């Protein structure tokens, strides 16, 4: 049976970022790192099915992990994208109130905008308040009463991001094993024995970054079911009419209260020039139900036509959906990322509930995981100068 120092389960953006961080930080000690992935490639699930926005953290509670790690992670991700030549659209984010809201919901929207402004102030996120004429200069076709602009927000090509992280992790010595869905985990005194559809291996530390399935993987390692993910689907329509797909060039979001489950259906331009509308938020029974009972375009029109009256249903084509790994919280609690060392010896770190802004936060999450005290202790304990050679894998 092959032995590793660290086994990461899941090669989404988070698993790849953790593998890279571990491989790079400890390059002179050459940790033996393996990443097990159920699919044939990295980033095939939620990491490929999102808006690609590198969020500032403004929508999150200022004291939360989501807020801190999105703030840190998005700055790192922009620098990384520039360095690695990953397609990046530096649009800034507009959070706007529509003229139509004068008739209904104006106070609710103004108070949401104000609370977002306060979040920005507390978390030191640079924002500007913009008047209708300021907005018209920025986005001539946008019909909005007022808004705030976060100039630093960018949109990344999330597929290219994941693949660059994976490539860096591999150059640092991490091994990726695809078609290796983890089916069993046996805790031993000083390690875990991990069984996949294809092999068994031993790992001194286990990091569960299995996204939508992180609750099931956590339950494989510790029989008590500690986490429950409730899948929440978000769908996108694409604006396909040639004359309309360039009418909005920036990210434009509605002003929803902070800590709403989604951030609202928004205009979502991409680095390759496509313009999408979405995502909505629909609870689904299955973690793989991407297409049943598609939401008709009316919901999307209702959310965004007030900002862009030229938009018509015939301009839209259902494009794709993603599923949020949402962990329900009790009333009054704030939903947050869970990064928990659920066993200290041998270390087991569960990374659960990484919904938005998980893409933005990935590099921040990786730093946070690698700093976990039990992980650092373990490597110091196993100590000395570990061998530079990597495990030779059974094929
Ligand atoms: C509609 C939508 C829009 C979003 N928009 C944004 C956005 O604009 N900005 C932002 O920051 N975030 C956004 N997010 C959130 C972001 O996409 C996620 O937080 C991020 O992709 C999570 O990455 P991950 O690596 O944790 O999960 P995943 O990408 O799901 O990766 C987990 C991996 O684990 C593998 N796996 C699962 N079980 C096993 C097993 N038993 N054995 C082996 N492998 C396993 C899976 O195959 C998968 O590849 C959005 C999410 C959704 C759904």
Image (cartoon, grey):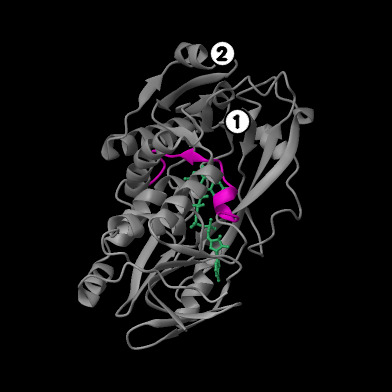
Q: Is residue 54 magenta?
A: yes
Give me the C-alpha separation between circle 1 and circle 2: 21 Å
- How many marks overall? 2
Q: Determine which quarter of the picture holds residue 237.
A: top right
Q: Determine which quarter of the picture holds residue 83.
A: top left
Mark 1 surroundings within 10 Å by alpha-carbon count, few (fewer than 14), some (14 through 19), many (20 or more): few
Q: Is residue 267 magenta?
A: no
Which residue does the numbered mark 2 point to in the structure image? 140
Name the secondary structure under disc 2: loop
Front residue of this view, candidates 259 and 79: 79
Mark 2 surroundings within 10 Å by alpha-carbon count, few (fewer than 14), some (14 through 19), many (20 or more): few
Q: Does residue 298 appear to the left or right of 120 in the view shown?
A: right
- N-terminal of the two: label 1 or label 2? 2
Which residue does the numbered mark 1 point to in the structure image? 272
* Residue 11 x %, y %: 51, 60
Q: For the point 54% across and 17% down, which residue is it?
A: 139
Q: Determine which quarter of the picture holds residue 72.
A: top left
């Amino acid at each position: 049976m092959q032995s590793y120092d660290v086994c990461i389960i899941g090669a989404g953006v988070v698993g790849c970022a953790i593998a890279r961080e571990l491989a790079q930080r400890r390059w002179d000690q050459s940790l033996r790192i393996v990443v097990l992935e159920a699919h044939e490639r990295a980033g095939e699930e939620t990491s490929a099915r999102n808006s690609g926005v590198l969020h500032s953290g403004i929508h999150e509670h200022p004291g939360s992990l989501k807020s801190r790690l999105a703030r840190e992670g998005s700055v790192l991700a922009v620098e990384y994208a520039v360095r690695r030549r990953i397609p990046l659209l530096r649009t800034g984010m507009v959070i706007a109130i529509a003229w139509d809201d004068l008739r209904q919901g104006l106070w609710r929207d103004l108070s949401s905008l104000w609370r977002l402004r306060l979040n920005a102030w507390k978390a030191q996120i640079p924002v500007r308040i913009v008047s209708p004429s300021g907005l018209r200069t920025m986005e001539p076709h946008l019909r909005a009463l007022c808004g705030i602009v976060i100039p630093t927000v960018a949109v990344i090509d999330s597929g290219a991001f994941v693949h660059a992280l994976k490539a860096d992790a591999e150059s640092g010595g991490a091994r990726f094993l695809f078609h290796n869905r983890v089916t069993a985990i046996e805790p031993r005194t000083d390690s875990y024995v991990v069984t996949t559809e294809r092999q068994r291996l031993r790992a001194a530390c286990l990091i569960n970054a299995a996204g939508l399935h992180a609750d099931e993987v956590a339950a494989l390692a510790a029989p008590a079911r500690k986490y429950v993910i409730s899948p929440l689907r978000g769908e996108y329509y694409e604006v396909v009419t040639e004359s309309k797909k360039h009418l909005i060039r920036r990210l434009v979001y509605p002003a929803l209260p902070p800590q709403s489950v989604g951030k609202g259906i928004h205009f979502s331009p991409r680095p390759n020039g496509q313009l999408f509308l979405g995502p909505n938020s629909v609870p689904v029974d299955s973690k793989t139900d991407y297409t049943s009972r598609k939401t008709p375009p009316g919901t999307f029109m209702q959310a965004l036509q007030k900002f862009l009256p030229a938009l018509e249903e015939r301009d839209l084509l259902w494009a794709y959906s993603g599923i949020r790994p949402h962990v329900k919280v009790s009333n009054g609690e704030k939903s947050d990322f869970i990064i928990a060392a659920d066993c200290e010896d041998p270390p087991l770190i569960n990374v659960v509930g990484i919904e938005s802004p998980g893409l933005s936060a990935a590099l921040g999450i990786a730093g946070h995981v690698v700093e976990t005290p039990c992980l650092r202790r373990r490597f110091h304990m196993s100590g000395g100068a570990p061998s530079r050679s990597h495990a030779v894998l059974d094929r």
